[in-house]
Amino acid sequence: MSGTKSPFGPQVFTPADASFEQRVRASFARQRVMDTLGASLTSVAPGEVVIELPFREDFTQQHGYLHAAIVTAIVDSACGYAAYSLMPVDAAVLTVEYKVNFLAPAAGRKFIAQGRVTKPGRTLTVTTGDVFAETDAGLKPVATMLATMMAVSHRETSG
């Protein structure tokens, strides 16, 4: 895996598996919670994944905003799949820890979660994620996450 072009530029990664996108998409398709939520995987690149979720009233909290647990679910998955995109073919991914800061109420017609690898590793990968609400005024930042993902091998199913 290669590093940065410059200290301030975007990271450029080389996946361990040339079929990483197919593997990420297949794993996402098996993730029942994302299907239940109605989330879709809209972009997969080495070290970066985007998941989108249309607003659903049945996922709101008492003030009518998308519930924090739903916001966290989509950005956790985006971070996990960003890490998974760089892992070897025999690896599976699990979240070790995360911290989320909620920046604004989750109000909008659609929510876009972008996960990115900050530092890949053989066992632990550090990622960041952001969630934006699509509104009439444009994209509004809703949440930001710092997460650590673990590569796990020798599991019955990968991903």
Image (tube, grey):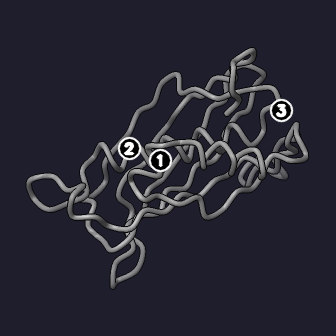
Nearer to me, 87 or 117: 87
The residue drawn where x is 72% and y is 46% is 47
- Residue at 24%, 55% (x, y): give it: 59
Three-letter amino acid code of the residue under disc 2: Thr
Q: Which residue is mark 2?
A: 72
Instruction: Find residue 137 and report its horizontal and vertical position in percent.
Output: 34, 83
Front of the two marks 3 and 1? 3
* Mark 3 element type: loop
**Element assignment for label 1:** helix
9 left or right of 126 in image: right
Q: Nearer the viewer, mark 3 or mark 2?
A: 3
Q: Residues within 10 Å of mark 3 (few under 14, many from 20)?
A: some
* Viewer-nearest residue: 40 or 63: 40
In the rendered image, which quarter is residue 148 located in?
Answer: top right
Q: Work out which quarter of the rendered image holds the C terminus and state it.
A: top right
Please report the residue visible at 83 percent of the width from the left and 32 percent of the height from the top: 89
Question: Callout 2: 10 Å neighbours few (<14), some, many (20+)?
Answer: many
Q: According to the image, label 3 marks what residue?
A: 89
Please tell me which of labels 3 and 1 falls first in the chain: 1
Check whether the beta carbons of the residues at disc 2 and disc 1 lie within 8 A of each other.
yes
Query: Within 10 angstroms of label 1, few (less than 14), some, or many (20 or more) residues?
Result: many
Local SS, label 2: helix
Query: Is residue 144 found left or right of 88 in the rendered image?
Result: left
Tell me residue 154's x, y (percent).
75, 14
Q: Which mark is residue 111?
A: none
Q: Which residue in the rendered view is the most extreme toward the bottom?
A: 136
Q: Position of residue 56 (x, y in %)?
A: 28, 64
Q: Which residue is mark 1?
A: 75
Q: The residue under label 1 is which amino acid type?
A: Val
The part of the image, by quadrant, that contains residue 84 is: top right
